[in-house]
Amino acid sequence: MHWLTTILIVLPAAGALIVAVAPFSSYWLGSFAALASLIEVAVWITAVSRFHFGSAALQLDQHASWFSDLGVSWHVGQYRFSVWFVGMTVVAMAACTIYGWWVGRTRGRAYFALMLLLTGAIVGVFTAQDLLLFYAFFEAMLIPLYVLIGVWGGSERLRATITFVVYTVVGSLLMLAAIVVFGLQQGTFDMTRMSPSTSTWLFLGFVAAFAIKSPLFPLHGWLPITYRESPAEVSAVLSGIVGKAGLYGLLRIAIPFFPQPVHDLRVLMLALGSVSLVYGSLLAFRAPDFRGVVMYSSLAQAGLIVLGLFANNSLGTDGAVLQIVNHALVSTALFLLAGMIERRTGTRGEFALLGGMARGRPALATLVMTVGIVSLAVPLSTTFAGEFLILAGVFQQGWGWAVVGAVAIVLAAMYMLRAISGVLHQDVGPAVSDSALDLRLGELAIVVPLVLCLLGLSAWPNLVAGRATSSAPVGWTKYAP
Amino acid sequence: MIHKPHVDWFALAPSLSLLGAAGLLLMVAVLVPRGARKPVGASLAFAGFVASGIWAAFLDDRSPHAAALVHDAMWRDRWGALAQVILAGSGAVAVLVSYRERMRDEHVAEYYALLSAAGAGMAFFVQASNLMTLFLGLEWFSISLYVLTAIDIDLIGSLEAGLKYLVVGAVGSATLLFGSGLVYGITGQLSFDRIATAGHAHDAMLVVGLAMVIAGLAFKSSAAPFHMWTPDAYQGAPTPVTAFMASGTKIAALVVTYRVLATAFPHDEHLWRWAVAAIACLSLAWGNIGALVQRNVKRILAYSSVSHAGFMLIAVAAANQLGARALLYYLIPYSAMSLGAFAVVAARERELQAPVTLRNLAGFGWERPFLGVSMWVFMLGMLGFPLTGGFIGKFYVFAAAYRHGWWWLIVVGVVATMISAYYYLGIVRAMYFRDTAELQLAPAGGSPPYDPLLTAGVAVALAVTVGSFFAVQPLIDVARSAANALPL
């Protein structure tokens, strides 16, 4: 019995309630929300300091019956991999909330309340150990996102919200049907007490929801318009964190509870991962804008992570876990940088209008360069470690998959270097004037911590990846006992 | 000397207290000076509903074992008592919402009298235990509602709506009556439990009678294909009346549907199960698809109520303990959500002096933050999103269907929910994502009318909607003991 995980969920939700009713101006509500998100990070650090990384068991958990006749309970806790997912969530959400405060979003009361609510919901997704509770949080993420895109998004925001909602609601309701059936078959919804099932239909119900959220080819249709029309920090959350909820679902639910369907459909899932990886990379390479590159690269990364997850061994799973955390930080940083660039130039990030921004803007150039280089998995970076583990893992499934992965890494270098040079180098673009200043101190304070996290992980990827080479026969048994 | 049956006045108190209020209100209409009629009338009706609710709660507490009342005409049990509590709550909120409704002064006391009488009829109806009281109760509250629908003769469409409701409702009542006649004719019994034991379960005439009883009740719960009156009546009636109809009628009709089927026709379970499941699927399809193309918010909510009848009928079709529990649980957040949603519509209507459409909801969420957020929560609840009882309700309904082995009903429900996302979120979109500048119609001007009673009603509905998500266990315990009163 431990309150820390519950506090991690309830604290931002309570903050949201306070923001919703407190009689202050937008500016002060924003400061309060920023403070709350930083306190959330501090609580998470406390949780990590109490965490025993030697144990694979559920920790910091709390259990209370919600309604007993169907065996549903408030059961939250963290495994030694999900603690890092919570970590990336609170860090990225803090960065995004502070960014929203820094740019001074209008209708601050609603905006900051929703951002805090979103934080609580995402932490809930990563910590819920009851299937229905997991679903509740999974759906609850959608509510603030819907409004955040619909109110503060770009001119096509109405179409974006409809597309986004149609895709995600279809996926998650299929999952709801699967959850009802699966839970009633088992007599409990507590994931720590459920035993594996052999039903392919249930597996597909879960996978549909997770593949849409991640997203995976061919269910990524909501991606372009949603990521382009959202405010930059909401795109950062969507791509960095919310997408990871889908991958987490595969890791925590779809793979451990359905070993037989996983085995049968492994090739299909690996193929979907490979197609997402290559197709996403190609789309990123020809995207006309900075955000386009980042968003399609997140499709590619989701594909790569799925390769790792369905590699069916410890190496691949370790690599996937590490890569989820890496990409969350990279993607958040890149989208925030995209937002900063768009704000300065009054564009929507089109390469045709940008270029030459490195001149006279050392901070911006350094940060874009650093994050870009990390994201293309240059050796010694943490993403290199993650991708290497994934490739090594998937190699054991067949060398062909590893070849696909390796090719895509080359593609990643191509699209990322193209994006970097399109923004920073080449001739000065028509939209880049002298009034487009270098990053301000406030912006540095938002992005630099994310970069420092990435550099820290680069120095010590084993922190997240665990004892990667201790060869457990089946990867996930180590993660989900 | 006529033999008089023993009357358990306590068991009749929920109904009688409302009837008493209705009687007093009719006197208020003539004795109290015109200026004071509105506050006096509203307080009396409110007191009637509160008293009814308190009596019903006592009754629920004191009736662990079901017992017959008044010579087997009525039934004293927790199933009826719990329904009466929910009904009384809905009625009390409807009174709060009604207070500021634009209405002619000379009719205001009659309005509250009819509202109380309708409530009394519903409270009577849910206790019915034979075909005679069933029909009596149904007509009692229906006739009150016909008049209420048409009461505001200044409102365009109100009279038309009342007439439509009357005509279609009369067809429904006649169907029920004819069905009852056939059932009585074949079994020679009026009371539900004796019909069950009369042993004519497979007689064709009884089956026809059963089908007509189901159809007659489906008219009242506005399940497709018996829902034709719903959009017009909901749109044309004064909005507080719509709010009360949407929650009250549905509670009464569904609770009684389950009671009749479970107690009178247990041997034909294999037949009515399929019939109810078919009606449920039709309602889900028709309600949700119909709502997609509506622009008037009251019509959208009317179609949504058809689809909710479908969801609750899934629980009836499951015909097991879990289904009975699911039905009673679902009714609690559902009645709160629909009352609340119509109350918000009423607020907007009073502000604009015009029917509320998706277009003239623009900017509402920003102008009236509390009502906007409440409407948002009600819509998410009807959609079945978490943090509202609507989510748990749907979950229970699906669980009941699966427990019976009908997983395909889950699929139908899930597809229906997917479709409904479009129009429920469409209302949220209309409130928040558009600017007030897009309003096609100039608001009446000045600051929005101050209406603390309506706001209080919405707050109660909001509290129930959200509270039922967190307090599932106590509510399910109450629903379980109520469900135990029925034989299934």
Image (tube, grey):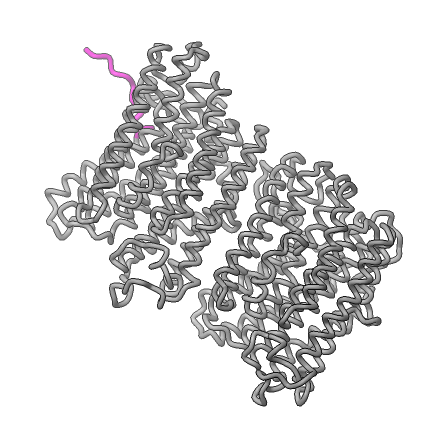
Give the residues drawn in magenta, as a range.
B1-12
x, y percent for residue B132: 30, 20
The front one of A451 and A430 is: A430
x, y percent for residue A254: 71, 46
The front one of A407 and B358 is: A407
x, y percent for residue B214: 39, 25
Classify residue B222 as left or right of residue A381.
Answer: left
| Image-quadrant location for residue A65 | top right
Magenta segment, principal secondary structure? loop
Residue B84 can be seen, yes or no? no
The front one of A239 and B366 is: A239
Q: From the viewer's perspective, is residue B123 above or below residue A302?
A: above
- The residue at the point 51 percent across, 59 percent down is A161
| Image-quadrant location for residue B207 | top left
Classify residue A475 as left or right of residue A163.
Answer: right
The front one of A3 and A326 is: A326
